[in-house]
Structures are given as structure tokens and as C-alpha cells.
Image (cartoon, rainbow, N blue to C red):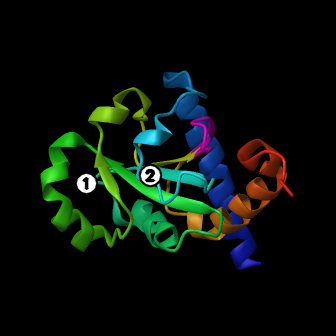
Amino acid sequence: MKKLLLILAGVIVLFLSSLLYREKVKPITINFPAKQLEQESITEKKLNLVLFFSIKNCPPCLRVVDFLNNSPEGTRAFGVVPEKELPLLDKIRQTTGVRFPVYGSRKFKKYCPVYAPTLYGVGPDGTIYFMIPCTGMEEDFLPRYLSEFVKKAFYLLYGPRRR
């Protein structure tokens, strides 16, 4: 029962955060520069999980980093930090535990959210499918959310299966 209440509280916080977020920014839903992210293979299509964050974010909000370090099958994680923090990349890795590639925000400036950290789900073609403000409750719902999202959006993400 206690876990259910925590999950419900997390969903409510996420919902309220998304309302505040949407008020300030018109979401951009296409043309994220996914090609500028490190590519494992040109032919391999994966859902890109792009975390905009800062070393200054609260530690509970950065719990999502642990999840992204072991990103689910069919996904790959990237980080984007403010340009002025990029020289501190070693300190960022030590402090947050980030093991995925991290870029400066200069190339991604027009996509920087008002609220950070924020997790973007970006398709291989650059389409932004979701933006989730990270509030520290992601470990309760994010694995299930991504699993359901990939199942339901499989055709959008990967196109028809080739035989």
C-alpha cells in the first residue's frame, strides 16, 4: 500500500510539473539534432534518451542517471549540460555517476527545457516523443513507462519490420 501511495504521489508530482512546464514553453516535436549524438551504428535504430541536467541539480532529481546508465534494450542514453559546465565533465561524472556520453548545450540550445533535469525521448529521425521533468520519483515508474512506450510506438520508432 505504501509503495502504491509513493507511485501515485510521483505521478501527481510529474503531472503538476508537466503543467507548469507546458505553460512556459511551446514544445518542439520535430527535428531534434539526433544525428549530432554519438551513433553506435548508422543502421541501428534506437530510442534516444536525452537528459538535460546540471551538476547543480538536487541529488534526488538526478537518480534518473542510475537508470540511464543501464538504459533498457532498444534505447541509448545521452546527457546535455550547460556549456559552462562542460570543462567540469570529470567532476560531473564523479558527482553524478554518469557513464553515458555527455555534450555541451550549445548545439542543443533551442531544445533546452525551462526545468532541468528533463528527460527527452527522441526517435532515430529526431522526433521528440516525450519530455519528462525529473523529480526524483522516476525509478518508480520510468522502467514500466519506457517498456509500454516502446511497445506502443514500435512502428513509429523503427518502421515496418524487414524480412
In this image, 91 relative to 96: left or right? left
Closer to the N terminus: mark 1 or mark 2?
2
Q: Residue at x 70, y 77 (%)?
A: 2
Residue 20 highlighted magenta (yes or no): no
Q: Amino acid at mark 2?
A: Leu
| Residue closer to the observer: 74 or 64 | 74
Residue type, numbered disc 1: Lys
Q: Nearer the viewer, residue 70 or 24?
A: 70
Tell me the quadrant of the picture where the C terminus can be found.
bottom right
Residue at 15% from the left image edge and 43% from the top image edge: 84
Tag 2 residue:
51
Label 2 near label 1: C-beta < 8 Å?
Answer: no
Q: What percent of the width, then of the height, locates residue 35? A: 46, 40
Q: Is residue 32 above or below residue 55?
A: above
Q: Label 2's element?
A: strand
Front label number (1 vs 2): 2
Q: Secondary structure at mark 1?
A: loop
Please determine whether, in this image, residue 33 is positioned above or below residue 26.
below
Q: CA distance from mark 1 to mark 2?
A: 14 Å
Local packing at callout 2 (Cα closer than 10 Å; few below 14, some 14-19, many 20+) is: many
Pick out the residue farthest to the left: 87
The residue at the point 35 percent across, 60 percent down is: 101
The residue at which mark 1 appears reads as: 56
Q: In the figure, residue 97 lies in which quadrant?
A: bottom left
Q: Which residues are magenta?
A: 122-131
- Place of residue 159 in the rendered image (x, y in percent of width and height, measured from the top left): 78, 45
How many C-alpha atoms fall within 10 Å of the one at disc 1: few (<14), some, or many (≥20)?
Answer: few
